[in-house]
């Protein structure tokens, strides 16, 4: 590329001659005269000439408007101030937001505490399921009565049980266990939740939560503190250490739980080197008080339909399986009602109760198990615990025992239910029987009153009338006759 040298002539831009380079200080009248020579290599004299011939700048103060007056519009009245926009219904106003940015630290109210019961599934870690608001408030009220008057309550005095979970369980706040009402089962652990993990809202262990609550109230009780703050911009103001973890307070509302395992400590060390906050790397935020306040109107409606679920064979192999099946049935029925029958009235509810009749039988007293051969014993034990129930029911010696046991269990559950729900019968509550396998056969025989022993007695009476010689019993059949009489008495 060739560059211009001093003394070169620049052609006009429109004519296309030479190379034209406009200068900032030059106008169009001087562009054909833009030439550099040895006396003025930078064009300073020409730029000065352009400045001398430049028209004066516009000055609004020297313009005379007397010859052509401008029509002026009449003065407008001042605009009235805009009225304040009322707050939207259901949303807090701006002043409310300002007032709620701070709160006074006090003891947790009963509505903020939430009680949980333990759920166990095969192959999974036990989880904590929250009680509904109605149950949690009643448990917390009873707990505070016992806890605050513990010194005046004799140890042998029995604490009243609280009926929960739709009326099928009872909670004892003294032992912190939940017991089934209508069937036999192991106690279920319950927990009083005060501090909760962020995200899952699973409760912190009760002993750790109690210590956190003590330290928290000891530091900020009665103080007005902000509800929200950033943990990355503050230092640790309180620290509590446990066996394998520790908790840091950055503010009353920013509390984090940290694990002291080697992996967690290594992650925090790397994060510190990278400038990442400790709470961001491996901390779990903790919340004081449950996310939803418990309310007394959060309760199930009264039971209007009772369904008694009767199991079949095989219950001896897995005692308590009918209880788990009925719980799944109850949950499935609730989901189906919500999705397919939302128009059903809210004041109606169906309750399913398990009827476990196999565990109350004596039968042969374990004779069959004692004479079972060891060869392929596993298969034989399965047959003894399942198919043998059919053989027992077909036997005149044990059939009546099975029938009587199921009948007594049905009456016991229904009487207990009516005692605890006195409104059921006056309101015309319905009762249904849901049976499976052998249970359906036994239920049918109970409802119809059919008995093979009675038919056999009728047959014998008819034969004795026609053949009087049958009244005499041979010597070898006396034991059989006595067993038949005993079966009739049962």
Image (cartoon, grey):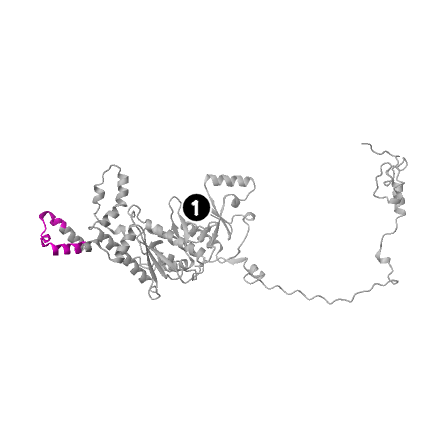
Q: Relative to the observer, which residue lies in front, 78 or 141?
A: 78
Q: Is residue 127 above or below residue 104?
A: above
Tell whether 105 sits left or right of 362: right
Q: Relative to the observer, which residue lies in front, 113 or 415?
A: 415
Q: Is residue 262 above or below residue 80?
A: above
Place of residue 195 in the rendered image (x, y in percent of width and height, measured from the top left): 45, 52
Q: What residue is at 52 percent from the left and 46 percent from the top?
A: 279
Tell whether 459 sits left or right of 100: left
Q: Relative to the observer, which residue lies in front, 401 or 471?
A: 471
Place of residue 19 in the rendered image (x, y in percent of width and height, measured from the top left): 85, 37
Residue 131 placement: quadrant: bottom left
> Which element is circle 1 on?
loop
Q: Which residue is denoted by mark 1 in the rendering?
A: 242
Q: Relative to the observer, which residue lies in front, 356 or 449?
A: 449
Tell whether 35 sits left or right of 256: right
Place of residue 29 in the rendered image (x, y in percent of width and height, measured from the top left): 89, 44
Q: Quadrant of the N terminus?
A: top right
Q: Quadrant of the C terminus?
A: bottom left
**Residues in magenta?**
456-480
* Few, some or many residues within 10 Å of mark 1 (<14, 14–19, 20+): few
Place of residue 80 in the rendered image (x, y in percent of width and height, measured from the top left): 69, 66
Residue 68 in view (yes/no): yes
Q: Is residue 471 magenta?
A: yes
């Amino acid at each position: 590329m060739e560059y211009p040298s001093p003394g070169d002539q620049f052609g006009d831009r429109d004519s296309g001659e030479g190379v034209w380079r406009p200068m900032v200080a030059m106008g169009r009248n001087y562009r054909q005269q833009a030439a550099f020579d040895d006396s003025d290599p930078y064009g300073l004299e020409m730029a000065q000439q352009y400045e001398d011939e430049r028209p004066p700048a516009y000055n609004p103060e020297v313009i005379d408007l007397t010859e052509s007056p401008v029509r002026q519009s009449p003065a407008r009245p001042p605009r009235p101030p805009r009225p304040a926009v009322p707050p939207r219904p259901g949303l807090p106003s701006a002043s409310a937001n300002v007032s709620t940015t701070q709160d006074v630290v006090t003891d947790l109210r009963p509505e903020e505490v939430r009680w949980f019961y333990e759920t166990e599934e095969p192959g999974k870690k036990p989880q904590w399921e929250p009680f509904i608001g109605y149950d949690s408030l009643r448990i917390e009220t009873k707990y505070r009565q016992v806890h605050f008057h513990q010194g005046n309550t004799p140890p042998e005095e029995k604490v009243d049980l609280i009926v929960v979970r739709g009326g099928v369980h009872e909670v004892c706040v003294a032992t912190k266990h939940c017991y089934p009402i209508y069937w036999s089962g192991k106690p279920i652990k319950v927990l009083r939740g005060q501090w909760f993990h962020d995200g899952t809202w699973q409760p912190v262990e009760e002993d750790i939560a109690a210590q956190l609550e003590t330290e928290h109230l000891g530091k900020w009780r009665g103080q007005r503190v902000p509800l929200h703050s950033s943990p990355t911009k503050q230092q640790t103001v309180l620290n509590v250490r446990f066996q394998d973890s520790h908790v840091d307070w950055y503010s009353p509302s920013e509390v984090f739980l940290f694990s002291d395992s080697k992996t967690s400590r290594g992650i925090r060390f790397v994060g510190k080197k990278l400038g990442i906050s400790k709470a961001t790397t491996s901390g779990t935020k903790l919340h004081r008080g449950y996310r939803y306040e418990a309310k007394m109107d959060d309760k199930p409606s009264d039971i209007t339909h009772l369904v008694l679920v009767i199991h079949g064979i095989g219950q001896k192999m897995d005692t308590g399986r009918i209880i788990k099946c009925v719980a799944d049935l109850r949950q499935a029925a609730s989901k189906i009602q919500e999705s397919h029958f939302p128009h059903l009235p809210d004041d109606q509810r169906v309750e399913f109760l398990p009827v476990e009749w196999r565990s109350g039988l004596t039968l042969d007293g374990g004779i069959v198990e004692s004479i079972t051969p060891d060869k392929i014993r596993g298969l034989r034990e399965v047959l003894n615990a399942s198919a043998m129930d059919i053989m027992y029911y077909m036997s005149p010696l044990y059939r009546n025992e099975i029938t009587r046991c199921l009948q007594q269990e049905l009456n016991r559950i229904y009487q207990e239910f009516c005692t605890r729900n006195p409104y059921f019968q006056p309101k015309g509550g319905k009762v249904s029987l849901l049976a499976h396998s052998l249970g359906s056969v036994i239920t049918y025989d109970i409802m119809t009153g059919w008995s093979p022993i009675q038919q056999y007695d009728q047959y014998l009476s008819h034969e004795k009338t026609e053949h009087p010689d049958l009244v005499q019993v041979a010597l070898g059949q006396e034991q059989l006759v006595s067993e038949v009489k005993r079966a009739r008495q049962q």
